[in-house]
Image (spheres, rainbow, N blue to C red):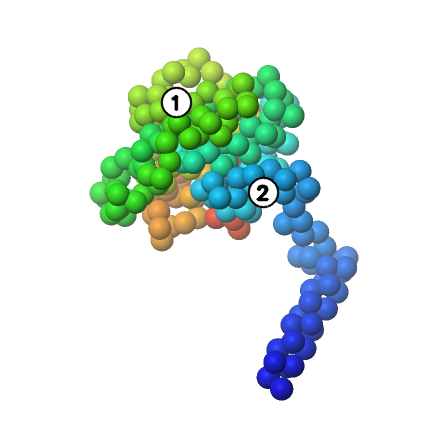
């Protein structure tokens, strides 16, 4: 009897959801997580490599459609195993193949955190299961990926003369995020977007939101906190 009740309850839930989705109003009018076939195909290739959630990747996928006509290149700070970089490369090479994708990471795990703002880390397990060689192999079919190994303070200076239409910052720590903002925001073209993966994860990465909020405190743009946990700004 208990099994039957559970089955009936599940069927009733499915029916209610179907009715809501057919409604002309309310949150189920259009389901933002009805992923496109193109996205699903790309995601299937990187699911085991992605350092961010599927929903977060889908937001990046949608953002790239928006910025394709904005002048400038792409930058990602915090590449990890290359999952989000692969998504960016697949999409941009179809929409705007003339753009270069600049990728920055130590490829050896997280650097030391700011003891005032960041949690204590187990440096033996914090994103060390990657390498620059494996990411180069993953992205090898793309001719417009420029991979930079090392600390941001040492590598971002290689793009001083570049401007950008899209920046993805996924580096967890206060100092890394703050420096990325300080360097890349002035080089972001009007209409360009910055997406911060860790903005809403204040329990795991309390310094992430603090760094972004402090940086944009005196700027025209204010971070928009998304239900994915990401934060985003559009350059005004």
> In what quadrant of the picture does the C terminus appear?
top right
Please tell me how crowded label 1 is: few (under 14), some (14-19), or many (20+) other residues with Cα within 10 Å: many
| Residue 182 percent coordinates (x, y) | 37, 27
Residue plotted at (34% across, 47% down): 206
| Residue 23 percent coordinates (x, y) | 76, 60
Q: Which residue is mark 1?
A: 148
Q: Which of these two is toward me, 178 or 64?
A: 64
Q: Which residue is mark 2?
A: 44
In the displayed image of the protein, which residue is found farthest to the left?
A: 115
| Residue 172 percent coordinates (x, y) | 36, 41
| Residue 34 percent coordinates (x, y) | 67, 49
Residue 26 location, quadrant: bottom right
Residue 28 location, quadrant: bottom right
Residue plotted at (68% across, 42% down): 36
Indicate whether 165 appears above or below 29: above
Residue plotted at (25% across, 46% down): 122
Whole-number angstrom distance, CA of label 2 to CA of label 1? 26 Å
Please tell me how crowded label 2 is: few (under 14), some (14-19), or many (20+) other residues with Cα within 10 Å: few
Q: Identify the element where label 2 is drawn.
A: helix
- Residue 208: tell me if it is visible: yes
> In what quadrant of the picture does the N terminus appear?
bottom right
Please tell me the numbered disc located at residue 20.
none
Q: Identify the element where label 1 is drawn.
A: strand
In the displayed image of the protein, which residue is found farthest to the bottom?
A: 1
Indicate whether 52 appears above or below 146: below
- Residue 185: tell me if it is visible: no
Marked residue nearer the N-terminal end (2 or 1): 2
């Amino acid at each position: 009897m208990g099994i039957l009740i559970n089955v009936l309850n599940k069927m009733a839930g499915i029916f209610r959801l179907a009715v809501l989705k057919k409604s002309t109003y309310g949150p189920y009018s259009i389901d933002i997580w009805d992923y496109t076939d193109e996205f699903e195909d790309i995601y299937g290739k990187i699911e085991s490599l992605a350092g961010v959630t599927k929903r977060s990747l889908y937001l990046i996928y949608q953002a790239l459609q928006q910025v394709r006509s904005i002048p400038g290149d792409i930058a990602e700070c915090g590449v990890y195993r290359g999952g989000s970089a692969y998504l960016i490369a697949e999409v941009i090479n179809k929409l705007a193949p003339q753009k270069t994708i600049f990728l920055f990471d130590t490829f050896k795990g997280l650097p030391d955190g700011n003891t005032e703002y960041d949690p204590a880390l187990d440096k033996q397990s914090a994103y060390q299961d990657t390498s620059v060689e494996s990411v180069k192999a993953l992205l090898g079919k793309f001719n417009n990926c420029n991979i930079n190994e090392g600390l941001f303070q040492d590598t971002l200076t290689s793009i001083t003369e570049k401007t950008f239409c899209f920046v993805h910052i996924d580096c967890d720590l206060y100092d890394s995020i703050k420096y990325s903002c300080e360097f890349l925001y002035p080089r972001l073209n009007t209409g360009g977007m910055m997406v911060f993966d860790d903005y809403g994860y204040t329990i795991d990465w309390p310094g992430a939101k603090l760094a972004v909020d402090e940086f944009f405190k005196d700027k025209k743009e204010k971070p928009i906190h998304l239900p994915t946990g990401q934060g985003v700004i559009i350059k005004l």
